[in-house]
Each structure stands twice: as structure tokens, then as C-alpha cells.
Amino acid sequence: MTEYSIGLDLGGTNLRAAAVDRTGRMLDKVSGKTQYSEGREAIVHDMVEAIRAVRDRFGKENLAGIGIGVPGFISLEDGVIRNCNNIASLENFPIRDEIGRRLDTTVILENDANAAALGEKWIGAGRDVNDLIMLTLGTGIGGGIISNGKVLRGVNGMAGELGHITAVPNGNPCGCGNTGCVEKHGSATAIIAMARLLGLGENVTAKDIYDLAVAGNEKAIMIFTSMGESIGLVLATLVNVFNFPLYLIAGGVIGGWDLFAPAMLAETRRRSFTFRSTGTRVEQAQLGNEAGLYGAAYLPWSERKGI
Amino acid sequence: MTEYSIGLDLGGTNLRAAAVDRTGRMLDKVSGKTQYSEGREAIVHDMVEAIRAVRDRFGKENLAGIGIGVPGFISLEDGVIRNCNNIASLENFPIRDEIGRRLDTTVILENDANAAALGEKWIGAGRDVNDLIMLTLGTGIGGGIISNGKVLRGVNGMAGELGHITAVPNGNPCGCGNTGCVEKHGSATAIIAMARLLGLGENVTAKDIYDLAVAGNEKAIMIFTSMGESIGLVLATLVNVFNFPLYLIAGGVIGGWDLFAPAMLAETRRRSFTFRSTGTRVEQAQLGNEAGLYGAAYLPWSERKGI
């Protein structure tokens, strides 16, 4: 049988594990809801069982490795999630080593947004470049930087925290301690918060605001413009800093691309000489929800041989 | 004789060339004023003659290569300065190839701030790390990123334009087309501009404002606080993006370190969870004006073998 790898993506509401071969073909996938409210032991148990189910099916002989994408600030040295607004029970717990112990093998831990960027680089919108940055716009904003074909990790594995770049210096407070993080101004959560402030409803979704904007509601249009501008400012910063050929926008919010992209790109153009004078591309990601799963599965190969 | 390299640094008011050996010992240095107002031919002539003078003294046999640091946005592909506020006559001129032709050899062109960061990495404040970012605070603000021991160049050689990161979204207009670039809020020029606005004098220098602040002038103190905060915001962004172990502050403005550093570091701390939770260092550079000269000289070795 061909060599395969196992990827696991621990998302905001569910976890998925998959077996993927070296060419990026998905051989098998298991997914299920995880009861985060039931605490750490339940989550770790579900993660281990999902991986074990896939491994039992394809065997240990041809397994290249196991990669796991999790939300939060990951400390690479010790495989610990240092800060995780979504799953507080996993904070400061040696999750990498505990999962490795239960599976009797080593596993590679990575921030979920880094894993998603790696997936897009491998078989998605970035497969023709070696350097890209991806912003994933969801309830928060995740970032992943692929430099020379690999995840840029930094000295502690905490690089790429692009959602916490300041977009509005005196803006909305963020759980990280800052004010005006781009994830408080450019995410789905930010869209909903602006809609509430503008009286568009208490229980609206980002999709509701999108529909209102398409129908011509000026407040809803303004929300997407404002959100696009905050993403554009951050893109301009990243273009000025990295001069990479490709910047990808991913996540649920890209459903509103036609509404926010014009403001976003105008802001990037205005704030970056490099953007205006080079062929820098800003594009939508292609793999959707699967990017993180593919990227997690690719981690063992990326680590072992480079890309 | 030992192998040596020639570095040339084209500064805002003068140019310098030096012969440096592989251990970082400076064997010889020539410097002189350049009459930028006399136009391109005069500048290129002076650059070529300075390099030739050094090479004639030490010979071609042991010459490892020639590195040149110049201000502005450099397009690496074609060795052209794309945008240079200081020396407009050099814009869009194939300076690398023209100097190479006159010297009958290849030369390596690099942005001066990148060269300075490389110099600090080689034999300065960054010699114990492989990854660092340097901000040079002078009349403008230059940036250099050293990743895995080498200059991070990006796809066109325009990476590291950190002076054009937006620090104040609706701030002062910049020659690059943006508003609120950090170099319009955190440089010596910005200090002087704020002093004028606050009525501290029309013909003051940054040093004058420093002396006023030390003497207790509240407006002058506020200027250094404001300037420090804008640098701190940018540092927080860079820490969140890179998670590198070391960030260096260089340039003439670091003479005012005791006045702006507290505000700068408080802002970085507030705006970066990664800074607060890791051992990230923010320090003064050590090589002063010589950093760019050493870094230019190191370019041939950096290119040839890595560091």
C-alpha cells in the first residue's frame, strides 16, 4: 500500500481526522462533534480515538506521521497551547505529548491557521508559489505564513498571529489584551457586532448582514466596507514587510468577497507602494474547510523533507 | 593575504567604502561627501572610484566580492532602485549593472537598512541569533529582516519596508502615498515636525528636543512618548507576525532611548500577547553608522555560503 499520513483538525465545533496520501488524495475521513464543555479529558479522548480509527484502518507500516491542527497560541518547544479563547480547558496542558503517549508515537502540533496555509500551499491556491500568507476570516482571524515552502514558526512557534495585528489603534478590546486587533474589526464576529451597534438586529448572522447589503441596505454595505478596510490595512502591512507573491483570504467570511474585497484592495493599494509597483496577488483560498485537514496531514512530510 | 570583501554604503550625506576580512576586521576605509545635487553620473562615478581605490590597494585575487547598500525600494530582479526619496536621480536606473560594468565584475545591491541589519547579525548585537528584525530610526525609518541568517528579500527584493507600516491610520501623509506610516510618526523628522506643531521652534533639531525633554519640558517629553508609542505599535505587530527572539533599534534617534523606550516597550507589551509571554528581546543596535558598511561587505559571503 502507498505511504499515507494522518491529519487531525480541531475546529471550533467539531474535529475531523483524515488519511491522505503523498499526492494529496484523501483516502478516508472521520468527523464528529466534540463536547468542549465536557472538558479536556473528553476532547483528548475524542482526538485520540479519531486518529486511532484511521490508523487501524490503514496500518502502521505505511504511516508517514501524524499532524494535528489546534486553535490558539502554540508553544512549539513544549507542544502546549498557551492561549486559546475557544477551548480554555486545553490551555497550558501538554497536549502534544499526551496524545503522543496514548497513541505510542510522536505527533506534530501546529496552529490550525498555519496548518490551513500549509494545505493551500500544498494542493490549493498556493501550489504554484513557495511563499504565501493566508488570513482566515471566521469568528476570529487566523494567520499562516509559508516562507520558502514551510510554516514560519518563529522561535517559540508563535509566529503568524496575524489576527492580533493592530488595525485600529484605539479600536475594540480583544481577549489578547490589545485594543483594535484586526480580528475585532474584520471577522464575522466583528460584522455581527457592528450590525448590533447600527441597530440591524440582535440575533443576526454575518450572512443576514450580507443579504441586507446585497439588497441595498446602506448600513450593511458600510459594515462590509469597514471590515474590508481593516483587512486591507493589515494586508498592506504584510506586503510591505514580506513582499511575497501571494496573499490568500480564507474562511467563512469570503462568501462576502464581492462586498468587502473592493474596499480591502483599495486600502492595500493606498497603503503599500510595494503592492502598487509589483504583481502582488490577493486571492481567495480554494480548499475551504478542508485546508486545515490537508495541511495537518502534510506536516509530517513538510517536517521530514521540506516541500 | 587573507580573503577580503568590499562593502559600500551610500548614505544620506556621504558614501563610504571599506575592505573587511572574513572575521569582520576592517582593513581599510575611504569616505567622502557625495554631491547628490550634481546628479546621477557624479554619484555613480564617486561610488565606482571609492570601490576601485580599495580594490587597487588589496588586489583582485583575494576579493570575495563587492556589496553595496543604497537607500530606497530596491528591485532585486534587475538591480534597480524603484523609489528613493533621498536620491531621486538614481530612480529607475540600472545602478547595479552599471557599477558592475565599470568595475568589470558583479556587485550585489541591497537596501541600506537590510545591509545594516545583516551587519548587526554578523558582528553586532545580533551575533548570537539567527533571526532578528532591525528598525533604523533616522530621518526616515528603515527596516531589515534577517531570517535564518539571511536577509528576507521577498519576491522582488522589496521586503522589510518597515518604515511604511501604518502606525496611525489617519496620520501624516507619506511620500509613499500612504497616511500614517511609522516613519512619519517615529523618526527624527517626525520629532522635529511635532516640535514645530507644538511651538517649540522652527529650526530645532531632534537633539534640541531631547535636551528640552531632559530639562523637563512637558511638550518635549510628550513628543518622545508619542514617537515611542508609534514604534511600539509596529514592534508589537512584528512580534505577533514573526515571533523572532530579537528586535533591534538603531539610528541616530536611539540617543533618546531613555526618553522613548519606556513608552515604546509599554505599547509593545500591551499590544502583543506573544511579547508578554515569551522572552522576546528589544535592544539597541551596537554598530552605529558602521552597521551598513559591515553588512554590505558581508553580502558576498552571505550570498555564497549562507551564514
Image (spheres, coloured by chain):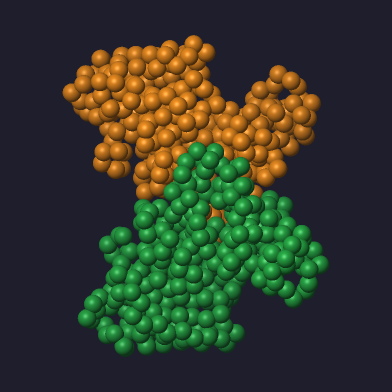
Chain colours: A orange, B green
Image quarter hosting the N terminus of chain B: bottom left
Splitting the image into 4 quarters, where does residue A173 fall? top right
Splitting the image into 4 quarters, where does residue B179 fall? bottom right
Q: Please tell me which residue lies in front, B66 or B238.
A: B238
A287, above or below A270, in the image = above
Specify the farthest residue to the right: B199
Splitting the image into 4 quarters, where does residue A274 fall? bottom right
Measured from the top left, where is residue B22 in percent x and y?
Answer: 29, 70
Q: Please tell me which residue lies in front, B140 or A176.
A: A176
Specify the farthest residue to the front: B215
Q: Say which residue appears at 26% left-offset and 83% top-offset.
A: B60
Q: Quick check: can you spot residue B300?
A: yes
Q: Say which residue appears at 64% left-offset and 67% top-offset.
A: B188
Q: Please tell me which residue lies in front, B198 or B49.
A: B198
Measured from the top left, where is residue A26 in percent x and y?
Answer: 33, 25
- Left or right, residue B33 beside residue A189: left
A202, above or below B1, in the image = above
Q: Say which residue appears at 43% left-offset and 73% top-offset.
A: B293
B304, above or below A11, in the image = below
Q: Quick check: can you spot residue A227?
A: no
Marks counted in the figure total 0
A217, above or below B138, in the image = above
Measured from the top left, where is residue B9 in percent x and y?
Answer: 46, 75
Image quarter hosting the C terminus of chain B: bottom left
Measured from the top left, where is residue A162 in percent x and y?
Answer: 53, 41
Q: Please tell me which residue lies in front, B100 or B234.
A: B234
